[in-house]
Image (cartoon, grey):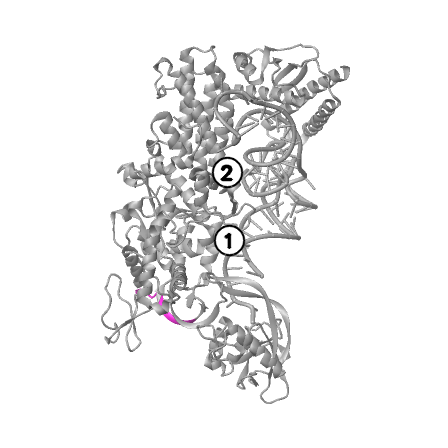
Amino acid sequence: MLDKNFDPASFEMRWYKAQEDAGFFRPEASGPDARPYTLVIPPPNVTGRLHVGHALGRSLEDVLCRWRRMQGRAVLWVPGVDHAGIATQMVVERDLKERTGQSRHDLGREAFVALCREWAEARRGDILNQIRRLGSSCDFSRVYYTLDETRSRAVRHAFTTLYHQGLAYRAERMVNWCPSCATVLSDLEVNHVESSGHLYSIAYPFETGGGELVVATTRPETMLGDTALAVHPRDERFAGLAGRRVIVPLTGRTIPVIADAFVDPKFGTGVVKVTPAHDPNDFEAGKRNGLESIAVIGFDGRMTALAGAAYAGLDRFDARKKVLRDLDAAALRRGEKSHLIPLARCQRSDTIVEPLVSLQWFVSVAPLAEKAVAATDAGETRFVPEPWKKTYDEWMRNIRDWCVSRQLWWGHGIPAWYCPGGHVTVPKPGEGDPDACAMCAEGPLVRDPDVFDTWFSSWLMPLSVFGWPEKTPDFDRYYPTSVLVTGFDIIFFWVARMIMAGTFFDGRAPFGDAVLHGLVRDEKGQKMSKTKGNVVDPLDMCDEFGADAVRFTLAVLSGTGRDLPFGKARVAGYRSFATKVWNAARFALQMLEEGADGAGGPAPAPPQAIDFASLGTVDRWILSRLSEASADVNAALEAYRFDEAANALYQFFWSDFCDGYVEMVKPALRGAELSAEEKDRTRAVLKRVLLDSLALLHPFMPFVSCEIREALNGDGLRLAMTKFPEPNAEWKDDGATEVIALVRGIVTRVRNLRAERGLPQTESLRLGIELPVGPLSREIQRHVPLLSHLARLSTVEISSNVNWPGAYRDVVTGAGIVVELPKKEFSSEDREKLERDLEKLRAEAEKIRARLADSSFLARAPAAVVERTQQQLAELEERSARLSGNLVEAAGA
RNA sequence: GGGAGGUUAGCUCAGCGGUAGAGCGUCUGCUUUACACGCAGCAGGUCGCGGGUUCGAUCCCCGCACCUCCCACCA
């Protein structure tokens, strides 16, 4: 029995648990011969809470998994969580501060890492349960954690392999340094934001006196570390200046003027200050010209001793103000103007990133990128939607070395050791920790204190989740995976790098399809953010409207566009759909139980085998539609068009099944016209369509579908492993479809007329249908009781010519219809409406007539098109004639 | 500076060479014994602008405008 009240909370988790307990989420459930279908979950942060973006990804993945599972595939969807180095460290640090007032340094590294581990352990279950709440059918017996032993082994193997192939190296480079996170960042972790700032002009007097050079800069504080001024070699304004020396204001140092083509003569004053220690461009220029490098800003974001006693210890932005003041005092400011500066900000802390020279570990990824691109070019991995391939290609082509070391405590340690002599020892893949220096055999060795970039473990995910580098049975069976579903925002961070790792370490790309979805935004299309307060929590939505509704909403929204406007109202809308399904099932249950007649048992009769040929038109039509809907859903899912699949289902179930079929079948099942046997046949169809609809729905709404199948057929649990409906060629019935379309068309026209003319619903009308004698008219004749019921008709007359003087005449898809209206004057509004309609028809007909009069159209357009056009014209003229007849009647009345 | 995507009904979006579609919303009727999270019905669109190709363009091509986003070390 289904309760009158639809309450998803009462059954959702019960079904989830039943399915998980039954072992359905393990690929073994599909038998040893089933073809694998594999996905790896993009691991959410251990410490986080699932957001809508996750909900979207998990929903789409689960639709795929459940659908493929029902198709008999051995589905393995591997769940996992990410230790999320920098994010976790920051969260734990903040918590520590709040609780005890201590910093991680107060605690010490070992204790702090232990604290992080505790946190991660404590949160891991939460996040996994949140994934469960969405209905995700992951195999929780294979959960991975990016910092567990297996994954650590993979990270170490990857790094040592790269190192010994000369692809990982340690070097002093200009890097992105975040002073507040106190770590280096990769280029990807830096956001460039245009901000308004100032371009300051500063005068550098010549050492020998007699003038000055004016330099434009956005960062006056770095002048303390200037080691040259530069001009373009062919800039005649400054010809002959190279080699002269100028005084760096406020420091008294003198520096040379150099000529270097990196200077853009059109920018600023055409003279550039060169600060090799604090600007990537200048760093290169410095190397080219053998310039000294003076680091005046330290890793803490404060001025160093080299900046001079007056500035040492000052925050870099305070130093800027002081420098400007001091320049004013020295009368060396030459003005300023506002200027848009592309500021580099830390993705995590939003702090302005400082370019600093530092010794770090890098991976030269260009060779890996080459392999990856070769694989994607060969179609080993397909991007969906396809334009993302270009974005990926572009990035791969211009790829720069990846800085993989981080000055954090929480993460994978770098397997590199240093001897007192400064030599580096990295063990060979598979080897243990070294005891002595590989070069000079000296000890003791000190391990590198840094950890890897979190993505250095993530990029191995498709490999490491199956135990790589070990040759495990899972690896053999499930690598490469079938598809990856993730947001386009991590196409570089993750997708591209995984392809590199897969093609490099294994030789095969890690997934067949990379499905990139858009970003979830709020209802108004604005980015969700805590500060705006427009964040929608998917788990709250699940509690309020049911996970089924949330999933369905996300599927519908995941069209081709980039942004998904998600909000409460929409989820509520699709909850209505779930409710509709629920109520349709309640109705069906009633109908089926009535069929059990004397038996009176609560269990509805099992569906009898359907003998299509013995069925009536209405039954054949709905089965034909069901078959079409199955085809549509399957095709859409093959193409990863979750929106189309969901819409096809929605449309079929609501419009065709509920509004169409159920309404047509009601009088038949309740009336006395049909024999018990005929009713049973229809009941069997009703049940079959509903059961199949629930199966089609199951990947999207895995809970209501089970709950209803249980009530209807006692197979709620098995539904997850039931064969997914496919189109049935035997059920294709264009004849039935035509008849039903006409019946529904006529019904709509009559209802419409009733509404237009303000006729009461209770009043029965007389309807004439003009059709040439033939199979169609005989079919329609057979549906007179149905028509009468649906359109409230007292009599229906069908003949080739219905001649009811004064009756209203129209035409619906080729059939003339004649409605005898009760004596009622046409109001002037009615007449106007009629005239407007006629005018539209006439204009339409005129256009078509013109087209048909065009000889080149007749000569060049395909015959079928010409024929259809002629038919259109005929129909328009027919309708036009009938409606103007009504107008004449109106005038006469 | 490069690149990608967008511009279709009040809103959110599908469609993409033969007379414009959906959901939601608006409006008008409905206690029609599954469902008001409902039923029935109406209204609502120069498919951003200008050219071109074509018998025919919302759809293809070329410009333009505006919006979004990504990449990029220019002071």
Q: Position of residue A615 (x, y in %)?
A: 43, 16
Left or right of A868 on screen, residue A504:
left
Kindly identify the residue that appears in the image at 59 percent across and 68 percent down.
A197
**Is label 2 in a helix, a strand or a loop?**
helix
Spot occupied by residue A823 in the image (x, y as percentages of width and height) = 70, 13
| Image side of residue A706 versus residue A653, left or right | left
Q: Which residues are magenta?
A: A164-173
Instruction: State yes or no: discs 1 and 2 in contact (Cβ < 8 Å).
Output: no
Which residue shows up at 50% across the image and 67% down it?
A352
Residue A652 highlighted magenta (yes or no): no
Name the foreground residue: A728 vs A432: A432
Q: Which image quadrant: the N terminus of chain A?
A: top left
Rendered image: mark on residue A529: 1
Which chain's residue wears label 1? A
Q: Position of residue A316 (x, y in %)?
A: 51, 74
In the picture provided, is A587 more to the left or to the right than B74? Answer: left
Three-letter amino acid code at disc 2? Ala
Q: Amino acid at mark 1?
A: Ser
Main secondary structure type of the part rendered in magenta: strand
Cα separation between marks 1 and 2: 22 Å
Name of the residue lying farthest toward the front: A100
Q: Do the dots labelled 1 and 2 sit on one chain?
A: yes
**Residue A113 in view here:** yes
Does residue A166 lie above or below B69 as drawn? below
Q: Which residue is at 42% across, 67% downward?
A: A184
Q: Is residue A313 above or below residue A760?
A: below
Q: Quadrant of residue A25?
A: top left
For disc 2, the marked residue is: A572
Image coordinates for residue A370, horizontal then vertical, percent: 40, 58
With A836 as the anchor, is A528 left or right in this view? left
Quadrant of residue A494 in the image? bottom left
Comes first in the chain, label 1 or label 2 = 1
